[in-house]
Each structure stands twice: as C-alpha cells, then as structure tokens.
Amino acid sequence: FFFSSRRRHTRFRNVTGVQTCALPIFARIRLAAGLMAQRDPAATSAANRIGEEIARLDELIDKILDVSRLESGTTAFDREPLELRSLLEAILVDAHFEAAQLGKTLESRLTDGPLGVIGDRYWISAAIENVVRNALKHTPEGSQVLVTLESARREGTRVAILGVSDTGHGLAESRSEE
C-alpha cells in the first residue's frame, strides 16, 4: 500500500505497476533538481519548475489510475452526508488563487445556508474541482468563470444544482453527453 497525503483527505490505496515504476523515477528527478539548486543558486528557478512538473505528472498518473478504477468497477463509493456549499467554498479558495495566476476572474453565486447531499466526499470534490479547473484552463485570459450552486425541487425532492459557465471553446457536441 502507498500512503498519499496530497489529497484533501488521507487514504490508503493499492499501488499499481505504473505507480510502482513512477515513484522512484520522480524521487530521483526531485533529488537531482534539489542538488542542482544547491550547487548553483541561479538554477533554483529551474529546479523549482522541475519540481512543479513532477507534481503535475504525479497528479496526472493518479487521475489516470482513478479513471481506470472507475471504468473497471473496482472503486467503492463511500456514501455519507455532506454539506455541499462548504465543500464547494473550500474548492473555490484554491480556484480563486489559480484564476488570479491565470489572469482570469472567478465569481461565485452560492445558495444561502447549508445544502446537504449524500455522496462520496472524495469523488464529488474531485469532479467539482475538475470542472472548475477545466473552465479556468480553457477560458481566454481576462475572462470570467462563474460557479453557481442552488437548491431546487424536482419531482418533490430537493436537489442541488451546480453550474460552471465560462467563455472557453467548450466540448464538441458529440462529446457533451460523456
């Protein structure tokens, strides 16, 4: 088992062959970048960039493995009561920072008060974060991304409606149902 603390919550998970191979490679690259920065202070910026890219690659491998587990049906979902508004607010704190770094504006209009749902905290957070980050990534610089959360009644049941809108190119019509 591999202990991962990068995620918002700590969890144990099986290590697949991909991660088993990638972890030592990433550790060696990080070590080499650190040594490079120690020996040549002018290389600190490059070493930091290398570290950021390794973190991105590691995150990408995690996402690929998550999708693989979802598609294979080996993922178990933990159904628990969640307060969606506060979960979304926590995601938006990081997203506001990312938006500013990208020269974009992130606005939010969230329902007043708590909004309870039942679901898996990790997967709901990951899905929301993915949609918000994709909107930030694909909307033009100087543009705005709007995140909305509201409560509505559908067929006598209270539901949460989360919206993310941007001015990016969007999905091709053929992929919009995926």
Image (cartoon, rainbow, N blue to C red):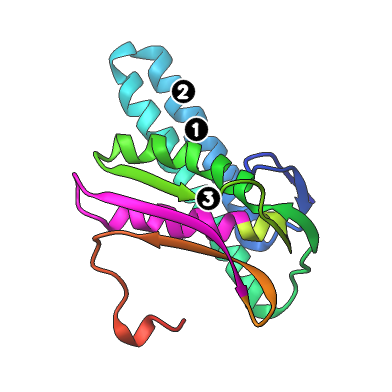
What is the C-alpha distance between the residues marked 2 and 3? 20 Å
Left or right side of 140 for 132: right
The residue shown at (44%, 34%) is 51
**As shown in the figure, which amino acid type bears the numbered disc 2?**
Gly
Point out the frontmost of discs 3 and 1: 3
Q: Does label 2 or label 3 sit earlier along the sequence? A: 2
Does residue 20 appear to the left or right of 1 in the view shown? left
What span is colored magenta in the figure?
Answer: 125-153
Identify the element where label 3 is drawn.
helix
**Residue 95 magenta-highlighted:** no
| CA gap, disc 3 and disc 1 | 15 Å
Q: Amino acid at mark 1?
A: Arg
Position in image of residue 103 (x %, y %): 24, 39
Q: Are marks 2 and 1 in contact (CB under 8 Å)?
A: yes
Q: Which residue is mark 2?
A: 34
Q: Residue at x 51, y 56 (%)?
A: 149
Q: Circle 1 is placed at which residue position?
A: 30
